[in-house]
Image (cartoon, grey):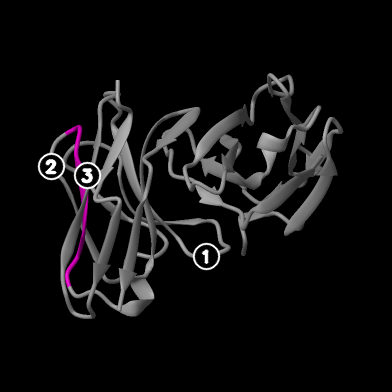
Amino acid sequence: NAGVTQTPKFQVLKTGQSMTLQCAQDMNHNSMYWYRQDPGMGLRLIYYSASEGTTDKGEVPNGYNVSRLNKREFSLRLESAAPSQTSVYFCASSRVNEQFFGPGTRLTVL
Amino acid sequence: AQKITQTQPGMFVQEKEAVTLDCTYDTSDPSYGLFWYKQPSSGEMIFLIYQGSYDQQNATEGRYSLNFQKARKSANLVISASQLGDSAMYFCAMREGRNDYKLSFGAGTTVTVRA
């Protein structure tokens, strides 16, 4: 039981490049999330998926797109990376009284 | 308006003593849940404790307890018998609604345990 897994762990991009962050969970949860954490701050919600086939914007969705590929997988895409997207990205899945987080992806945009 | 407020940016505590981390929240939904997470320097988010808005008793998990004061909209975390390994950032978070599990996070409190 791996919980929530994310790839890659680290990534460096140049401004304007694109990339997809991958996330998978093996706990059969319906709900999945993408958060970002900037230095010294709490996590902010980018996008979420309440169930397979649905996605919704969170607090900071600009510059991102998501795909809920199936119940297990939820990917986050940066189409044209900007330095302001330098952050640590966490994927999570949840049941009502617990949210499980992946290990995070540290992304730097130069 | 901020949904979760953590007013203590950093705290020091002596090993084996207790420490209380403050958290206040703002919601008009009668159904909500409050979470505390620990984030050590390695960066992972570790779930500590959960309190539902309808729970009659304060939640406890080992050395962690949640002092839930609903009328004051307060959900303080108490860590008893602090250990050096408790040095970390601690986040309070809230979900709102019966079927909505997304979380709003506070800015966090850094705890440093001194030997």
Residue type, label 3: Phe
In front: A44, or B99? A44
Decide: is B49 above or below A36: above
Q: CB of mark 1 within 8 Å of CB of mark 2?
A: no
Residue type, label 2: Leu
Disc 2 sits on a residue from what chain?
Answer: A
Q: Is residue B101 visible?
A: yes
Disc 3 sits on a residue from what chain?
Answer: A
Numbered label attached to residue A39: 1
- Residue occupying the point 25% across, 26% down: A26
**Pointer 2: what residue?**
A69
Specify the quadrant that holds the C terminus of chain B.
top right
Q: CB of mark 2 within 8 Å of CB of mark 3?
A: yes
- Residue occupying the point 69% across, 52% down: B109
Decide: is A107 above or below A34: below
Residue type, label 1: Pro
**Pointer 3: what residue?**
A74
Disc 1 sits on a residue from what chain?
Answer: A
Can residue A87 be found in the magenta stretch?
A: no
